[in-house]
Amino acid sequence: MIGHLVWKNALHRPLRTALGVLAVGVEVSLVLLIVGLTHGMLHDVAKRIEGVGADIMVQPPSASVFLAFSGAPMPEALGSRLAELAHVKAVAPVLLQLSSSGGLDIVYGIDPASFRAVSDGFFFLQGHGLEKPDDVLVDDWYARAKHLKAGDTLHLLGHNFHVAGVVGHGKGARVFVELHTLQQITGSPGKASLFFVKCDQRSSTNDVIGEIATLLPRYQIRPLQNYLSLMTQTTVPGLNTFVYSMIALAGAIGFLVIFLSMYTTIVERTRDIGVLKSLGASKGYIVKALLGETTLVCLGGIVVGIGMSYGGQFLLRDLFPTLTILITPGWILRAAALAIGAGLCGTSYPAWVASRKDPVEALAYS
Amino acid sequence: MEPIVKTEDLWKIYRSGKVDVAALRGVQCEVLPGEFIAVMGPSGCGKSTLLHVIGGLAQATRGRVLLDGNDLTRMSDAARTMLRRHKVGFVFQRFNLLPALDARGNIAIAQHIHGDGFDPHRFDTVTRLLGISDRLHHRPAELSGGEQQRVAIARAIINEPKILLADEPTGNLDTKSSESVLRMLRKLNQDLGQTVILITHNPEAASYAHRVLHMRDGQIVDGIPVD
């Protein structure tokens, strides 16, 4: 019966209930999209680095696991010393440059031959490899986002490049140009930001890492097999704070909307509360009825929020194909728990006020 | 026979700003089981306050109220709530039905709060007796005043309370509906032995009762049997 009362009360004021559901939906989708976007971007970058196919990545001391933050402080010639080490099959120098034309993208300056040796080459969907200094390769997601095809012109880093080919995604970056071209554009002749190292066999990886550590003490030497595990929120300065601030903001939205909605509700239903008390309803009964109504609104909001999140994901993917939004069951549960928790907290004070109303005054309310 | 309601030197004093206002001033009365009592008096004489105190909605300031042997003046708020649930039925002037529920829901919720669950036999008996069996799926806004008041009476008696307290139940009704509601109250009293205390301004309404108590300035000034 209390469920029936809760349901009927929710239906009695459909607009208010709908607004409550929508607000909780916004709260849930805010959490899922913010977290999904950060996790998705990290996951996407990590998968692409792993997808290069190399076994080891060498970066200068103090370099970040996030390649976009790296400069070009290593001499390219260091690559030949790495290539001389035992069990090293191939070494590919890569120069990184962040491009902000039409979005933030890392451009890889690569030597096609050595990059092919460590990565087993690109999978070409259109066109051919880098043959001329102004050639550029883009992956399929980037091509879709920028509406590019082989033969088109791409304005990048202040230069016009010729799109030589479109390749399958997952080889480190989404945009590749000749190493020497990028060195000239960035004023870093003979420099590289990192080296990808391919071992003769995967089991030799640790031995090679040891040799490189001896050769280049203090350098960042990372096996790429578990690169994904390095790319977490905690490794980006401030990202955790940002994510948790957004979650707190979402929770505050849910709390305030439910608080105001339920406070208005109990003022409006003052006489109803008096009637329930005259029938002998306990304080607990009244609190339970109001908490039940909040739970119903929150459950509706969670369903709407999940729908809005997947809708947002679909829309963002359509507008920005290079964005990755990762909505996971774990975060859906956490967002749902946040919504219910914030809602119940928001209702607790109005429910307490309602349960303590004087029945005679409540019945006289008009 | 033991009275179902007994008040002894009953006082109720309200604090209005810095002024104490005595709504009841030493009320003495007794109501026997099965009696139909009307309480009359001018506005502000304390009729409704007396009803609220007898029904456990308000706490007395001084004196004693015994309801079916329970001293309400010594009870906590929770205990009075429990007592209302099991022994008292209220009918109000403004019907006070829950607008979100239909007539059936308004009656059934009283059974739910009472705690014994839905009793379909009792429900059918009461709704048939009050002539609302065919109006049960209508919300209060879809019912006439007389129908709403009959639903409110059904809600009040569904749990077989020891006493039915009706606070000007015909105050918002036209003459025809008023007569219908008053006949219902008398029928409940005669057929089921339901004890009723009726607050009213209307001498015609009071004529349905066995006895009329007159109040003035917070006191019962006389108790006249109705012929």
Image (cartoon, coloured by chain):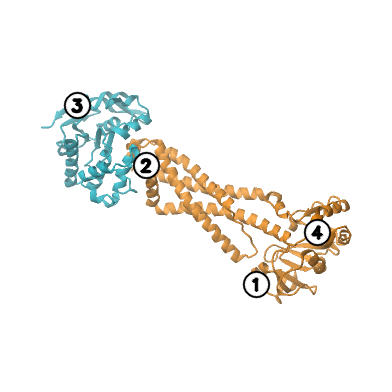
Colour orange belongs to chain: A
Marks 2 and 1, how far apart at CA: 61 Å
Determine the secondary structure under disc 2. Answer: helix
For the view shown, which residue lies furthest in the bottom direction? A151
Task: Tell me the quarter of the image containing the N terminus of chain B.
Answer: top left
* Residue A153 location, quadrant: bottom right
Query: Do marks 2 and 1 share a chain?
Result: yes
Q: Does residue A258 appear anywhere in the picture? A: yes
Depth order, front residue of A50/A248: A50
The amino acid pointed to by label 2 is Thr
Where does residue A74 sit, x and y in percent of width and height?
Answer: 84, 58
Q: Which label was assigned to residue A270?
A: 2
Quick one: label 4, few (<14), some, or many (20+) residues within 10 Å?
Answer: few
Question: Relative to B208, is A293 above or below?
Answer: below
Marks 2 and 4, how far apart at CA: 77 Å
Q: Earlier in the sequence, mark 2 or mark 4?
A: 4
Determine the secondary structure under disc 4. Answer: loop
Quick one: label 1, few (<14), some, or many (20+) residues within 10 Å?
Answer: few
Tag 3, which chain? B
The amino acid pointed to by label 1 is His
Q: Earlier in the sequence, mark 1 or mark 4?
A: 1
The colour with which the image depicts chain B is cyan
Q: Earlier in the sequence, mark 2 or mark 1?
A: 1
